[in-house]
Each structure stands twice: as C-alpha cells, then as structure tokens.
C-alpha cells in the first residue's frame, strides 16, 4: 500500500480548531504515515503552528511534522522553535525558505532553505528527519530551471532526507523532475504533493502565484460544468485520483495531500484510488 501523509494549516479561531479536529478524525482512518502543519513567514503564525503540532501529537496521537521557514526569522528564533518541537517529541521537520509577506522589512538571518537545513543538522545532528520542497514545474522565482535543480541538490547536500513537491497536475512534470535530480546524483525520495480540487477559482488564483500549471483541458471542463456542484466534485476527484494512480504506477514512493483542512476532497480521491 502507498504511504500517505496529510498537510494542514494552523487554525486561528475556535471554530477553525473544531473543524480541523473533525477533519483529522476523518482522515486518521486512512492511517497516514505522518501529518504536517504549515508555518507562516515572519512569525505571524509562530504560536499557531506549534499549538497545532501539540494538538496533533497529544490529542490525535499522530506523528506530526512542523513546517519551518527561515525567511524573516533570526537564528535564535529558529533555534528556539526547533528546541520546542524537539521537546514536543517531533522527529520530522519540513524545512523551507518561505515567502516574506509584502511590506515586511527584515529578511531574516538565513537566505535559503539549504541554509536552514544546514543549521538544523549543525544543531540537532540526526535527530530530525528533514523534508524540503521540490518544484517539478520550476520554482517561480528561479532564474532558470537548471539552476533551480542545482539549488534543490544543495538542500540535499546540506542534509535533507526527503522532498515533497509543489502540487502539479501533469504527471510528466514529476517524472522528468525525478529523472533530472537522479541524473545529478540525488537519491532521496521525492514525494508528490497532491492538491485535491475543491474551490476551483481559488485554486486558479493560487496556482498563478505559486507557479503551478492547471492544464487547459481541466480549466475548460471546470468552466463548462459551472455551478453543477456534484459534477464538479466528481470530475475533480476523477482527475486527481487518475493523477495519483499514474504517479504510484510510475514509482512515486508516497503521496502527500494538501488538505486545506478539509476531509471530503481528499477522501473522494482516496476512495476512487481504492
Ligand atoms: P529554496 O529552496 O530556498 O528556493 C527558493 C528560490 O531560491 C528558488 O527559486 C531557488 O532556485 C532559489 N535559490 C536557492 N538557493 C539559491 C542560491 N544559493 N542562489 C540563488 N538562488 C537560490 N511556505 C510557507 O511560508 N510556509 C509553509 O509551511 C510552506 N510549506 C510548503 C510545503 C511544501 C511541500 C512546498 C513545496 C512549499 C511550501 N511553502 C511554504 C512554500 C515555500 O516557502 C515557497 O515556495 C518559497 O518561495 C520557497 O521555499 P523553498 O524552501 O523551496 O526555498
């Protein structure tokens, strides 16, 4: 059976917290290898992430991995968070650069995710299993695709043991990326990040900013289905389940689902995958 993991974002209100608890209760039935919780750059969700991680470990008895982004943070802040996560019992970290919210001044002490990976290794040895981000369709700020691959390799050379990709809807992009990094000598597992489709207009907006391409045929079909919510849900789940099957058949080592704290879109994909 393919290993799966689920990603959540940290809820900020009591209502959102209750919703996340319901979502986690439902998704737990799929026996995830681990779950992860995102982190907002510049400290804005600093306390929310660690609180959510504590809840996932202590209340839900899950193996929970915090995301940690270095942008906007000082070395001391990052080390203090790492110490907190270690005290909570975390063994896995998703290490990222992050994106500085517009208007925020201080870039932080570390420039790239590779620097954060190196810091974690230097301070905590082998305690944490470190995952990093990967971009099969190239990171939107990369000067070119080949340099982006070299920068990915630098994170692995610094000590990353696994990678999770940005979401994509073209299996070929993933397979080409894996072939390219293998050719550079990178051997770590590269796990596809899967974005089930729920709110399509939101997804379209988000995809523009993070550099993920929505194929024209999906866009056109979604437009045609319009307000027929049942048909939209069924089509979206079919498309994403088909993508997951191709990825697994082609050798993807696991699947990481961006749940957006919703159970249903992810469950619909998993149900279709059997
Ligand atoms: P890096 O690997 O540092 O790369 C960033 C850019 O810099 C790339 O274009 C790269 O080519 C370039 N670069 C790297 N090294 C060098 C160098 N030495 N010289 C010149 N250029 C270089 N964001 C959040 O804020 N919170 C989250 O919780 C979060 N979770 C994520 C989870 C996953 C699985 C993924 C894939 C992304 C996530 N993101 C998150 C988004 C991520 O922070 C952004 O994509 C960010 O822009 C890049 O982060 P990175 O870790 O990939 O950066």
Image (tube, rainbow, N blue to C red):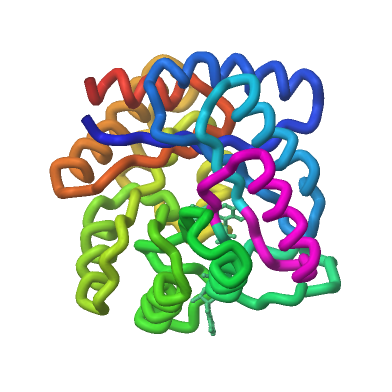
Q: In the image, is 82 to the left or to the right of 262?
A: right
| Above or below: residue 94 compared with residue 203 | below
- 31 and 231: which is toward the camera: 31
- 50 and 83: which is toward the camera: 83
Q: Residue at x 78, y 60 (%)?
A: 42
Q: In the image, is 29 to the left or to the right of 203?
A: left
Q: Position of residue 98 (x, y in %)?
A: 64, 62
| Above or below: residue 95 compared with residue 233 | below
Q: In the image, is 239 to the left or to the right of 128?
A: left
Q: Position of residue 25 (x, y in %)?
A: 54, 15
Q: Residue at x 81, y 26 (%)?
A: 13
Q: Which residues are magenta?
A: 68-94
- 33 and 71: which is toward the camera: 33
**Image quarter of residue 88:** top right
Ligand 1 positioned in quadrant: bottom right
Check if residue 274 falls in the magenta segment: no
**Image quarter of residue 76:** bottom right
Q: Position of residue 3 (x, y in %)?
A: 31, 35
| Above or below: residue 186 compared with residue 195 | below
Q: Quadrant of the C terminus?
A: top left
Residue 217 visible within the image: yes
Q: Residue at x 23, y 35 (%)?
A: 242
Q: Residue at x 41, y 68 (%)?
A: 138
Q: Position of residue 2 (x, y in %)?
A: 25, 34
């Amino acid at each position: 059976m393919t290993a799966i993991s689920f990603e959540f974002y940290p809820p900020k209100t009591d209502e959102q917290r209750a919703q996340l608890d319901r979502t986690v209760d439902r998704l737990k039935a799929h026996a995830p290898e681990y779950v992860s919780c995102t982190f907002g750059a510049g400290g804005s969700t600093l306390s929310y992430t660690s609180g959510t991680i504590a809840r996932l470990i202590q209340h839900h008895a899950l193996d929970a991995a915090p995301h940690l982004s270095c942008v906007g943070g000082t070395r001391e802040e990052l080390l203090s968070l790492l110490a907190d996560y270690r005290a909570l019992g975390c063994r896995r970290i998703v290490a990222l650069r992050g994106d500085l919210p517009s208007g925020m001044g201080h870039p932080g002490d570390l420039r790239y995710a590779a620097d954060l990976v190196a810091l974690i290794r230097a301070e905590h040895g082998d305690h944490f299993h470190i995952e990093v981000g990967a971009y099969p369709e190239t990171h939107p700020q990369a000067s070119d695709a080949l340099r982006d691959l070299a920068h990915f390799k630098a994170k692995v050379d610094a000590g990353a043991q696994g990678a999770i990709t940005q979401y994509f809807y073209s299996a070929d992009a993933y397979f080409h990326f894996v072939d390219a990094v293998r050719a550079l000598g990178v051997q770590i597992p590269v796990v596809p990040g899967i974005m089930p489709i729920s709110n399509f207009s939101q997804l379209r907006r988000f995809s523009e900013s993070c550099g993920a391409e929505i194929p024209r045929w999906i866009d056109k079909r979604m437009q045609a289905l319009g307000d027929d919510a049942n048909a939209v849900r069924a089509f979206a789940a079919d498309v994403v389940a088909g993508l997951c099957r191709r990825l697994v058949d082609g050798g993807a080592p696991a699947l990481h689902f961006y749940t957006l704290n919703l159970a249903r879109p992810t469950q619909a994909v998993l149900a279709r995958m059997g």
